[in-house]
Image (tube, helix red, strand yellow):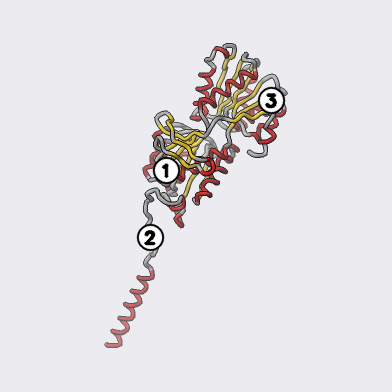
Amino acid sequence: MGKFKNVLMLLLMLLLLAACGNTSTEAPATESEGEGEAGTAGDAGEGGTAKYAFVFKNTGNPYGEKMYEGFEKAINEAGGEVIYRSPDQPTAEGQIQIIEQLITQKVSAIAIAGNDNDALEPVLKKAMENGIKVLSVDSAVNSNSRMLHVNQANPERIGRVQIQAIGEMINYEGQIAILSATSQATNQNLWIEWMQEELKDPKYANMELVKVAYGDDLRDKSVSETEALLKSYPDLKGIIAPTTVGIAAAGKVLTDKGLAGEVALTGLGLPSEMASYIENGVSPWMYLWNPIDVGYAAGYASVELVNGKTGALGETFEIGELGSFEVVEDGDGTQIMLGDPFKFDSSNISEWKDVY
C-alpha cells in the first residue's frame, strides 16, 4: 500500500510539473496608449512590431511603386513592418477585398490612395472600429473614411497651373482635351474642377475644352483614348493628362504620329518616363512632385497616428527628414499638404530623369 502511495504521489508531482511547464510567460497583448516607439505602438504583430499597410490604386503603376518606396523608407526608419497591397485593376471593389484582409491581419495602420471617394467608406469605417488608424494619400477618400489625408500639393495650384501651361503652349487659342485617370478618382476630379475654374478667366476666351476622357490609369486604354481624341477632334491643339500613366501614353501616341509642335502635351508625369517626350518637343514642359516624398510623408503620418495623434486641426506631424507639417482643413476633414507642383522642362529634365 505504501509503495502504491509513493507511486501515486510521484505521478501527481509529474502532472504538476507538466502543467507549470505549459504556462505561457508571454504578456497578453494590450492596446497602446500612443506612447513609445513605432515598433511597439498600436495593435502589434509578432515580436511586438506594428504593421503598416500601404494600398495603392493598382499594380504595375510606376508612380505607385515610387510612393511605396518612400513609404517603406519611413516605416523602416521608424522600426515598423511594411505591407504593400494593390488590386490588379484600379477599382474600389479590389481595394475593398484587400482592406478586409488587412483587418483580419490586424494591421496597425492603413494608408490608401483611394479608387473611389465614397465606396470605400463602409470597409474603412470597419477598419477604424477595429482600432486600425486610417489615412488617405494622393487620392483622398471622404472624411468619414479616414483620420487624415496626405496631400501631395495644393489642389488649386495643381489644376490652375496645367491650364496656364497649355494656354501658353497653344497661344491661348484652339481646342483642348483632358486625359484623366478614372472617373471616380478624387484627386483627378478636384484638379479638373480647378482647371475648369481657371478656364473662366477671359484670357482663355478663344480656348475650348472639348472632352474629358478617362484612361483608367491603364497604359493601353490611355493610348486608345488619346487616339480617339485625335480622331474625334482633328483640330485639337492640346492635351492635359494629370496622371503619370496617361501623359506617358499620350506622349508615345503623339511621338509615333509625328505631332510634335502640332498638338501640345502637358500634365503630371514621371521625369524618367517623360524625358524623351520633353526632349523631342512633344511635351514642352510638365509638372509633378516627388512621389517618393509623398509616400514617405504617408509613412510617417501613419506612425504619428499609431503613436497617438488624431489628425485634428492644428496638430503638428513630424515627417522625418521632411520636417514638421501642421494639420489644416480639407473640406470637412483634415490634411497635411506638402507643396507646389514642380516644373520639368528641357533645362532640367536631364537632372531628374535618372532620379524617379
Q: Residues within 10 Å of mark 1 (few under 14, many from 20)?
A: many
In the foreground, 244 or 73: 73
Q: Which residue is mark 1?
A: 133
Label 3 element class: loop
Amino acid on which the number 2 mark rests in the picture:
Ala
Residue 237, quarter of picture: top right
Q: Is residue 246 visible?
A: no
Q: Is residue 210 visible?
A: yes
**Residue 174 location (% of width, % of height):** 62, 14
Label 1 element class: strand
Gap in angstroms between the C-alphas marked 3 and 2: 63 Å
Is 319 situated above or below 193?
Answer: below
* Quadrant (top left, top right, bottom left, bottom right) of the C terminus: top right
Q: Which residue is mark 2?
A: 27
Which residue is situated farthest in the left direction here? 1
Which residue is situated farthest in the bottom direction here? 2
Residue 145, quarter of picture: top left
**Residue 36 location (% of width, % of height):** 42, 51
Residue at 39% x, 42% y: name it: 128
> Seen in the image, is 136 located left or right of residue 177?
left
Q: Which residue is mark 3?
A: 282
In the foreground, 116 or 224: 116
Marks 1 & 2, CB-CB < 8 Å contact = no
> Seen in the image, is 203 located left or right of residue 7?
right
Gap in angstroms between the C-alphas marked 1 and 2: 24 Å
* Quadrant (top left, top right, bottom left, bottom right) of the N terminus: bottom left
